[in-house]
């Protein structure tokens, strides 16, 4: 499936922190790190584990610019 | 000012397309490109121009993961 | 690719309206309609056309409840 | 009050999971399920309970398309 | 209808700019101004006009803090 | 750094509730209150404390209007 979301960066799962409902996933995109807050359900459903190759996907309307 | 948003990638403005209300800004983050959809007002207010150093900022709740 | 986004409804493209930067896509999910605002680039890249089967994907953090 | 958000699907609350800050609400929209992540405060303030009729509201800019 | 979205500020419509797909609505909340980017459809459907009393609604997950 | 996000309201931190992953921050903007849901990491990184002057920042695409 091809997505309308214009931003797709590939990285590796560096850390996973689970709460009761939400989980934080840190992704290493080659030295820099990106963070995603998703549901624990999503982490379990994708069977995310440290070292997994992962796509970081962001819809362009969600991107803020700073100069 | 320090932001709560956890994702901040530095790049260079590669292209700007303006509509009547919305504008598309393409940012080169070192070979890969990110796209942001902001208001034309924002582009004008930041005086964005090709080649400008720019921060791409995304709140972690907006980040989708794909595996 | 499996997504962390928990909401995925399948429908058919019912209408496409293109502006200069943004496009509106109306999706028929069996009588009800959902609307998506994406970039014209996304519409072109996915080669969206009336009648196409399409997935409507929404991250759960974006969903507001009303009672 | 009429909302600018273009997407409003009616369903029934199927499950509620509360953490300390966030809650997950599963909504049955007639066989399919939608998930919303809201604050525990919101769940309490709306007095959400299993079986309640509920509106699932999504702003069109938040809708990603996949083909 | 009561919403799960925790932020609701009342103001008056100060300006409306329509493009082909998107519209910008400026809201005066008592000296300060807030801006909303919605579809032209939404502006038409709500029959928005300068001076209208309007609710500015934001889901808490969308709010970034800066210090 | 100047942001593309068009909405920036200054207030004071009124309350902080931390879960394991997410935190809720209530901001007093002069009688009215705004709520933000951010990661616990963000609260710690900004060293947020009751009474701090804080900017509430919202991208215009995230703002829903109700009439």
Image (cartoon, coloured by chain):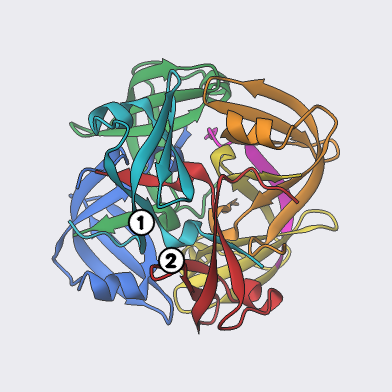
Chain colours: A blue, B green, C cyan, D red, E orange, F yellow
The quadrant of the rendering that contains the C terminus of chain F is top right
The spot of residue D25 in percent (x, y) is 50, 74
Residue D42 covered by magenta stretch: no
Q: Position of residue C66 (x, y in %)?
A: 64, 63
Find numbered disc 2 in the image and state the secondary structure of the residue it sits on: strand
Residue bearing mark 2: D34
Q: Which residue is mark 1?
A: C9
Mark 2 and mark 1 in contact (Cβ < 8 Å)? yes
Instruction: Please tell me which residue lies in front, B36 or C57.
Output: C57
Give the left or right position of residue A9, taking residue C56 as reference. Answer: left
* Residue toward you, C26 or F39: C26
Which residues lie in the magenta part?
Answer: F1-14
Measuring from the top left, give residue B17's x and y in whole percent. Answer: 40, 17
Q: Answer with the quarter of the image where residue B31 lies.
A: top left
For residue B36, which quarter of the picture?
A: top left
The dot on residue E41 is none
Q: Residue drawn at (72%, 62%), measured in percent from left and top?
A: E1
Chain letter of disc 2? D
> Is B42 situated above or below C34?
above
Q: Is residue F12 magenta-colored?
A: yes
- Mark 2: few/some/many CA within 10 Å (<14, 14-19, 20+): many
Estimate the spatial distance between the alpha carbons at disc 1 and disc 2, rounded to whole Å: 9 Å
């Amino acid at each position: 499936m091809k997505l309308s979301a214009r931003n797709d960066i590939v990285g590796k799962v560096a850390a996973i922190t689970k709460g009761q409902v939400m989980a934080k996933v840190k992704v290493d995109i080659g030295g820099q790190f990106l963070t995603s807050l998703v549901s624990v359900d999503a982490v379990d459903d994708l069977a995310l584990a440290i070292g997994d190759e992962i796509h970081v996907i962001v819809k362009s309307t969600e991107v803020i610019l700073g100069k």
